Image (cartoon, rainbow, N blue to C red):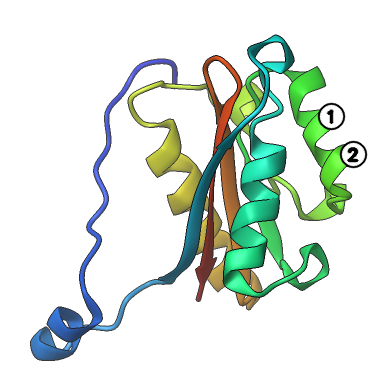
Amino acid sequence: IHDGAAALAVVAQSVMEELGLRPLARIVATAVAGVDPSCMGLGPVPATRKVLERAGLTVGQLDLTELNEAFAAQAIACIRELELDPAKVNVYGGAIALGHPLGASGARILTTLVHALRRTGGRYGLATMCIGVGQGIAMVVET
């Protein structure tokens, strides 16, 4: 996948209850952060630290992580800096294997994470990605 668009439905809990629906996952917390642009690709590191603090969680409590791979060295640097368990990162392959459609990568990462958590019986997952010029974004979800 190298080009695409995607959309996700984010619905208030009250609406889900009113419609008698059960969500696939709950957004626990979100965060954005940045680093000096000369360190492009490392934005997920401070964003992840920030989102974990907001969620009241530690890296050790994450069952799975989806980390967008802008390129291999970037993903390895983030995994090492955050001390993530590589066996729990991008368990179905990341952007290097699957592609990086800019208009759909965030939705692809989150969808992959939620379904992987449900398949494995996991509870908490982290979705994170770098954004140009040193920015990063992160979200913790609960299934």
Q: Is residue 100 left or right of residue 4?
A: right
Could you tell me which secondary element the residue under label 2 belongs to?
helix
Outermost residue on the top side: it is 38
Residue 13 position by quadrant? bottom left
Structural distance between the alpha carbons of marks 1 and 2:
5 Å
> Which residue reaches farthest front?
36
Badge 1 element:
helix
**Labels 1 and 2 touching (C-beta < 8 A):** yes
Left or right side of 123 for 82: right
Identify which residue, 77 or 30, lies in the foreground.
30
**Residue 39 picture quarter:** top right
Q: Residue at x 64, y 31 (%)?
A: 43
Query: Residue at the left extreme?
Result: 18
Q: Which residue is mark 1?
A: 77
Q: Quadrant of the N terminus?
A: top left
Vertical arrangement, residue 43 with respect to residue 10, above or below: above
Q: Is residue 136 above or below residue 70?
A: below
**Residue placed under numbered mark 2 in the picture:** 80
In the displayed structure, does residue 84 sit left or right of residue 121?
right
Type of the residue with mark 2: Arg
Q: Please name the residue shown 51% across and 66% down the image.
A: 141
Q: Residue at x 72, y 66 (%)?
A: 62
